[in-house]
Image: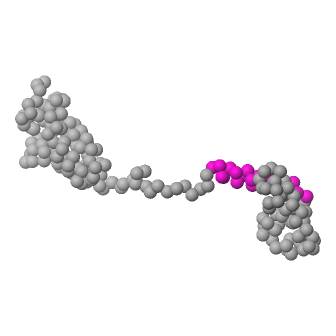
Amino acid sequence: MQAPAADEADGALMARVAGGDAAAFRLLVARHAAMVHALAWRMLGPADAEDVVQESFTRLWVNAKGWTPSGGGLGGWLRRVATNLCLDRLRKPRTVGDALLADHADEAPPADVRLDAERRQAAVAAAIRALPDRQRAAIVLTYYEGVPNAEAAAILGLGVKAVESLLVRARQALTRTLALQGLIEEGGTA
């Protein structure tokens, strides 16, 4: 294979590319890549222009044997190929890449905060289970189920004052237990 002359016609170079001449192909790329890139850049922007140039010249290499000169020559053929590739890209639904997504902070609490909260909930649940039955029932009914004291008293078969007394003793026991575990300060509330 002969080295291509810089002034050799596109048609002659295409005939050589059809025979697998890589040097002739490189010369055609050097001649026409800037034009193809400019066209793609104007149609698509910089992100996709390089891909269109690469695909255009891949098609030139693959279709070199079937290429026939026409009115616009090789430059016109490459413009048509590049334009069609650009139009194909414009028609495809675009996926949003990471670069286009707004960077939002994760609003979930950090892992250490969640773990502390889970540990605290488990400790409170264990402390409640350790309460005497009536104190546990009074705490669960009033604090977790939202039942008013009068209704809790009716459910437990006690007077309102007795339920209030159970609640005071249950809160004191919970405070002591949770303070011993370091989950609340002594004198704090459970």
Q: Position of residue 113 (x, y in %)?
A: 66, 52
Q: Residue at x 43, y 51 (%)?
A: 98
Magenta span contains residue 35:
no
Q: Residue 93 appears at what percent x and percent y?
A: 36, 55
Indicate yes or no whether the magenta region holds residue 127: yes
Nearer-the-camera pick, 147 or 124 = 124
Which residue appears at 11% of the width and 41% of the height? 68
Residue 73 locus on image (x, y percent): 9, 44
Q: How is the image coloured?
A: one colour
Furthest residue toward top: 1
Of 126 and 155, nearer the camera is 126
Q: Quadrant of the N terminus?
A: top left
The quadrant the C terminus occupies is bottom right
* In-image side of 77 versus 162 (left or right): left
Q: Is residue 78 left or right of residue 149?
A: left
Q: Main secondary structure of the magenta part?
A: helix
Q: Which is nearer the eye, 1 or 167?
A: 167
Identify the magenta region.
111-132
Count of numbered badges drawn on the protein: 0
**Whether residue 188 is visible:** yes
Seen at 19% across and 42% down, the residue is 33
For residue 128, say whether it is visible.
Answer: no
Q: Quadrant of residue 27?
A: top left
Q: Quadrant of residue 25?
A: top left
Tell me residue 181's x, y (percent).
Answer: 80, 50
User: Where is 174 relative to 35, above or below?
Assistant: below
Q: Residue at x 88, y 65 (%)?
A: 168
Q: In the rendered image of this protein, does residue 150 appear above or below residue 48?
A: below
